[in-house]
Amino acid sequence: MKATRRNLFKMLGALTPMAVLGGKALAADSGTGQGHPPGRVRTLNGWTLPHRMVDGVKEFHLVGEEVDHEFGPGGEGQSTRAKLWGYNGSSPGPTIEANEGDRVRIFVTNRLGEHTSVHWHGINLPSGMDGVGGLTQPHIKPGETYAYEFTLRQHGTHMYHPHADEMVQMAMGMMGFFIIHPREEVQPIHRDYAVLLHNFALHPGTSRPDPSVMQDFDLWTMNSKVFPAIEPIVAATGERVRIRVANLSMWNHPIHMHGPKFLVTGGDGGRWPQPLWRSEVTEIVGVGQIRDLEFVAEPGDWAFHCHMSHHTMNAMGHEVPNMIGVDQSGVESEIRKLLPGYMAMGEHGMAEHQEHTDSGHMPGPPNTLPMMMGKGPFGNLEMGGMFTVIKVRDGLKPGSFEDPGWYPHPRGTVAQRVSADPGFGSPIRRAEGNQAPPNARLSGGHKHPKQS
Amino acid sequence: MRRMLVVLLPLLAACASLPAERGYSEATTEVSTRIGHAPPSDLLSLEPTRPAVPEGEIGIGQALDLALRHNPELRREYAALGISRAELEAATRVHNPVFSIARLGIESGTEIARSVALAFTDLLTMPDRRSMAELGQQRAEAEVAQAILKMAHQVEQAWYELISAEQHAALAQLIRQANRQRAELADRMVTAGTLPASHAAEYRATAAETAIAATRAEAERLEARLELANLLVLPIEANWSVPMHLPEPKAVQFSDEELLAQARAERLDLKALDRAVAEHERSLASVKRWRFVGDVELEYEHEQADGEADKQGPGLTLALPIFDQGQAELERAKAALAGARAERDAAWYALGNELYAARAGLHSAAEVARVYQRVLLPSQERVVDGHQQELNFMLKGPFELLSVRAEQYAAHGEYLEAVRDYWLARAQLRMLAGGRLPDAPLYEAGQPEVGIDQFLPKAGAPDPHAHH
């Protein structure tokens, strides 16, 4: 057995009874969300739960509890923090990794103020271990610890989440990955990522999610983070990369990858037989569903995001008036007599919005990130929510996940401006509906009427 | 005749005229010591004139001076003092002696009879009449002083009402502006194709409602201006104004007991009622004293006849109380006294309750203003700031922001009304306490602290476009 840190845990567990290896010793070796303890899978912004071996059984210990969580920092003074419910100090909870054939024992301690349970989503197990409170087991009351024990007779990407007051508990962030590695990988994976999609109704200015919301969510997250706080997916050119995408949100998400096509190679039921693999650039991951996406890394910076465009925004109003094409000249100056901080926006679209919020002269509500964020080498990315970047570089060391920075495009491979004249060239245009807009509307920004 | 003159001379001395200022100076002093302003005591001798239109803002002190100097109503009140002065004059005088002469033909020639008669009843009742007239004069002085205080109170009320109406009208215009901009934005959206015309009509309808409200507020402002203009005898259209600030409400620093004691000592209407009771008591005593004495007349007669020695000697005419012993006058005096006492008692009994209710009203008004200032307005400000922040982050639109701004203006208007109500309640309490309050002996002209300009956007706010 190779002496990786993960294997050291396994060896240590095998040699040391749980009674001897106190919780303190375990805690010293376990992740706390600050780093990423080694596992085969890299959970973006997350961590893998250490285990110990007791009489041939892999023991894990989950603690359901309230956690302090930051969805992401923004510009200066901007951040969104919240009291979530999660496991072992984080949301999502730590990823549980085990191998096909393992016997696992999972302790679940409830440190919440109400009862809970844990359902092992997609895992074949005795009915009494399925974790549906009231149906297959008594609820785990506050302060109680339950033990789940079963043998893993499958492999694949799975989840765990409560099946008690689940509308609330999942809306509050209780979820995690349960990944079972196969006895043998048909095709070796060099980098294995896990992304758990979710949504939070963390209304602007508040610090606890609102579990009653069903559609109009404020934050669309990957592993409970929003762009640009979501870590990049890093790979070396030519490596085979797997991204396990699970969805515990209230919407389906068409996950789109720029750059190389990917193969959809598995789902909740494990890795599919190779003839079933299919090539896609966008894969809808339904609510409660999991998809494994695999690709061979090509150099560059490649966007990876949900294609529901609203899901790549942070907090935004869903009922704001549509000001596109609305000439506010004159009105704006009159409104400013009543509201000096007022600024007309949106006549030519919302692209300018990030400039305003980033510059700090238009402060938003406390504990609220702007709708659009992120800066790239060429300007504002104007993104948020379920968006991150796959960064592929030549010669990255195996196992290095450090952000390599922006991609140095080879000369001549970046789109460039050839004219600033809208009348440039003689493109064929259909006459109707394609009249050139007045120059004023091409100047960007908005008009500046005289203040009266 | 010489003896007659000896009797009349002391009477002539008693009939000296009243000083010219008697009554007027007493009334004005009563007012001046209470509110620090009073009409001139020689008001009736001054030529009635309209005041020159003052320059700039009219403070409450200037408003009082204008009204107390020029309002014709006060001349009418002063005329009442003239009546009471006449009564007092009459009470200090007796009817003139009557001289009669007769030439009669007699057998021996001619007889000339001369006589001087003096109605002695006047002389007998003069002390009582003078005492009653003196009390009547004091009653009149108190009543006139009370009327002056009442006018000052009306001026004060009208002054507060006008300040409030001016501010209310200005805020109504701001609310109208906010809604007008909402409607304008909505129309622009219709033009751009981002809002159905029917939705824009809702904004237009709301804007029209606020325009109507602003027009009504302007009418109310004019009505309040008319009220004060009439009291100050100023032309309504002239270029005069009142301040745009009211003093901030202050804590009530006196007890019910202090207030009641003050009112009992200071209330001029109660003083007038007391004097009226004393007047009637004196009247009843006089009736009782003189009920059996009818008309008494002293006479001295001299008869000179041809061929006869002159005859002369005094005479007395006396009504005999056989049929009328003054029963009617006695009943009348008793009834009048009972009525006066009842009226006085009613006022005294009501005094405590009136003060209690007015003081409670003042407390309520102060509490309402306090809650507006400490809680509601800061909350409204946070609401507007929050909406502005949400608009900045495109979480809300300008319609909601303008709407909450308009609501904030409305709340400001309600606060200003609460401050006005406080000062009106304080003025009312001061009136009930006799013209001054235990914690404010004279008229209080506090520093202006509350006004619409506090709520208006500050000029020179940074241009949010400046960063471009």
Image: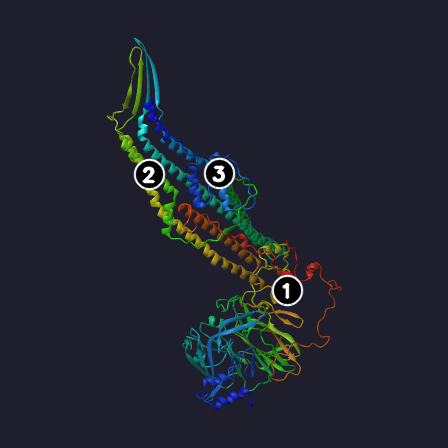
Query: Looking at the figure, which quarter contains the N terminus of chain B?
Result: top left
Rounded to the nearest whole Å, what is the CA distance between mark 1 and mark 3? 66 Å
Crowd class of label 3 (few under 14; some 14 to 19; many from 20; radius 10 Å): many
Name the residue that disc number 3 marks: B71
Crowd class of label 2 (few under 14; some 14 to 19; many from 20; radius 10 Å): many
**Mark in front: 1 vs 3:** 3
Rounded to the nearest whole Å, what is the CA distance between mark 2 and mark 3? 31 Å
* Amino acid under disc 2: Val
As helix, strand or loop, the secondary structure at mark 2 comes to helix
Residue A318 position by quadrant: bottom right
Give me the residue at 35% from left, 45% from top: B350
Rounded to the nearest whole Å, what is the CA distance between mark 2 and mark 1? 86 Å
Left or right, residue B298 beside residue A12:
left
* Amino acid under disc 1: Glu
Identify the disc placed on residue B277. Answer: 2
* Amino acid under disc 3: Asn
Q: Nearer the viewer, residue B192 or B147?
A: B147
Location of residue A384 in the rendering, given as x and y in whole percent from the top left corner: 59, 70
As helix, strand or loop, the secondary structure at mark 1 comes to loop
Asked whether the residues under marks 1 and 3 belong to the same chain, the reply is no
Q: Earlier in the sequence, mark 2 or mark 3?
A: 3
Residue B189, placed above or below residue B265: below
Q: Nearer the viewer, residue A333 or A430?
A: A333
In this view, which residue lies farthest toward the left? B322
Q: Chain of mark 3?
A: B
As helix, strand or loop, the secondary structure at mark 3 comes to loop
Residue A128 position by quadrant: bottom left
Give me the residue at 47% from left, 52% from top: B419
Residue A256, placed above or below residue A320: below
Name the residue that disc number 1 marks: A352
Residue A152 visible in the current orientation: no
